[in-house]
Amino acid sequence: MYKKYHVKLSEAERGQIFAISNSVQTSKTVRNRCNILMMADENVGKPPSQEEISKRSGVCDVTVYQTVRDYHTKGLDYVLRGRIHEKPPKAPIVTGEAEARIIALACSAPPVGYSRWTIRLLTERVIELQIVETIGRETIRGTLKKRNLNLT
């Protein structure tokens, strides 16, 4: 089978991979990538096939292919670090100040004609008071639950 990408590690790279794979803080994914690169290295002899490497390391053969490809095209540092997302995850709707105002509202007296606050009433009132622009019932419920606040 024709191999499109080849792994030829220098001594410094082998030492770096060995140190990372033996570190206690290394994740299983990074450790698997280290093992794949060590087995695929052509400088220490004829490497096994990618199918054999996948069986020995307990990963899918596509993982072996992608690890070797990433090493060849993007370098060792890219392969051995965790993926960094371009954009951070979605920012929370309820911040500290908004959360405090929601809790204060839930602890206050219910509106006229009601015996207690409900989640739906709180949601409507929070939007009405412009504590936040839009908010769902589940967000209000989760906020109250996080503080162990019961509406009954």
Image: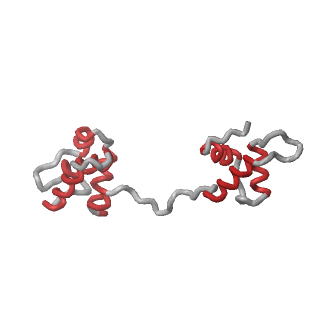
Q: How is the image coloured?
A: secondary structure
Quarter of the picture holding the C terminus: top right
**Residue at left 11%, top 53%?**
44
In the displayed image of the protein, which residue is found farthest to the left?
45
Quarter of the view holding residue 42: bottom left
Quarter of the view holding residue 99: bottom right
Quarter of the view holding residue 8: bottom left
**Residue at left 89%, top 43%?**
113
Viewer-side residue, 34 vs 48: 34
Q: Is residue 110 left or right of residue 44?
A: right
**Residue at left 13%, top 60%?**
11
Viewer-side residue, 147 vs 122: 147
- Spot occupied by residue 69 in the image (x, y as percentages of width and height): 30, 56
- Spot occupied by residue 122 in the image (x, y as percentages of width and height): 76, 48
Whether residue 17 is visible: yes
Whether residue 36 is visible: no
- Spot occupied by residue 13 in the image (x, y as percentages of width and height): 19, 60
Badge count: 0
**Residue at left 71%, top 51%?**
104
The image shows residue 26, relative to residue 73, as above or below, that is above
Q: Is residue 90 left or right of residue 27?
A: right
